[in-house]
Amino acid sequence: MVRQIIQAGIAVFILIMALHTSTVGAHGKVAMEEDNCMRRIGENMIHLSAYQPQVDKEGHYCTDIPKAGNAILVIDLVDPELRDIPVGVKIIRGSNATEGEAITSLRPALYEDGVISTQNVLDQGKYLVLITAEGLPPLNYEYHLRVEMVNYANVFRATVGPAVGLLLATILIYKLLRSRRFKNWLVSRRAKPN
């Protein structure tokens, strides 16, 4: 009986860990093709990183920026072809390019080192980063930023594993307590003299 309880506990623990670790992952530990900060049009790729040294000196973010305030946005032109054509950047307050207010606008220029950097003060809310490369055809990349906003999808993904594990553990304990074998074992333990 005790052996079955231990086996069930181990199974629940393994299930909880499997579900929980699949939802946890740092930004920098994914393949380039799976990175949500990477944008691809055809063979051309760019990457966006946001830094907030006043919040976390070593942390970098992509679309969810933890705190309002100073933010450094770094755009990496991954493909060398993009370094030979003019690239422009526009940061718009809001999530619509036609309705939002442009807070930063970098004219198209050549970035031979492949790095575009801008520093802005971002208030709480949504922003749109538009990156245009004046190639043939012109290339347009978009990043939707969320500054100091709760991402409910991430919260749900982070809690679903432990919640399922807790539910399974509760069901197993309930089944164990209701089983005849456990009741017989309990009766036999009570019947033994000390």
Image: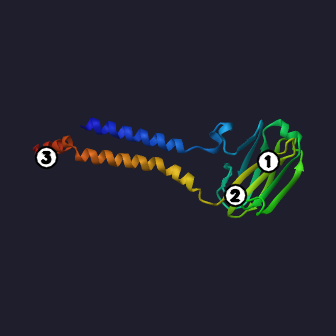
The residue lying toward the viewer, choosing from 193 and 66, is 66
Q: Is residue 101 left or right of residue 85?
A: left
Q: Earlier in the sequence, mark 3 or mark 1?
A: 1
Number of numbered tags placed on the structure image: 3
Tell me the CA gap for discs 2 and 1. Answer: 31 Å
Q: Indicate which label's residue lies in the foreground, 3 or 2.
A: 3
- Residue that carries the numbered disc 1 in the rendered image: 140
What residue do we see at 34% from left, 49% from top?
170
Residue 125 image position (x, y, % from top left)? 68, 63
Residue 67 image position (x, y, % from top left)? 66, 60
The residue lying toward the viewer, choosing from 12 and 96, is 96
Q: Amino acid at mark 3?
A: Arg
Q: Which mark is residue 54?
A: 2
- Residue that carries the numbered disc 3 in the rendered image: 190
Q: Is residue 121 left or right of residue 165?
A: right
Q: Amino acid at mark 1?
A: Asn
Taking 184 as reference, is 50 above or below it?
A: below
- Marks 3/2 in contact by CB < 8 Å: the verdict is no
Find numbered disc 1 in the image and state the secondary structure of the residue it sits on. Answer: strand
Taking 98 as reference, is 16 above or below it?
A: above
Residue 160 image position (x, y, % from top left)? 47, 49
Q: Indicate which label's residue lies in the foreground, 2 or 1.
A: 1
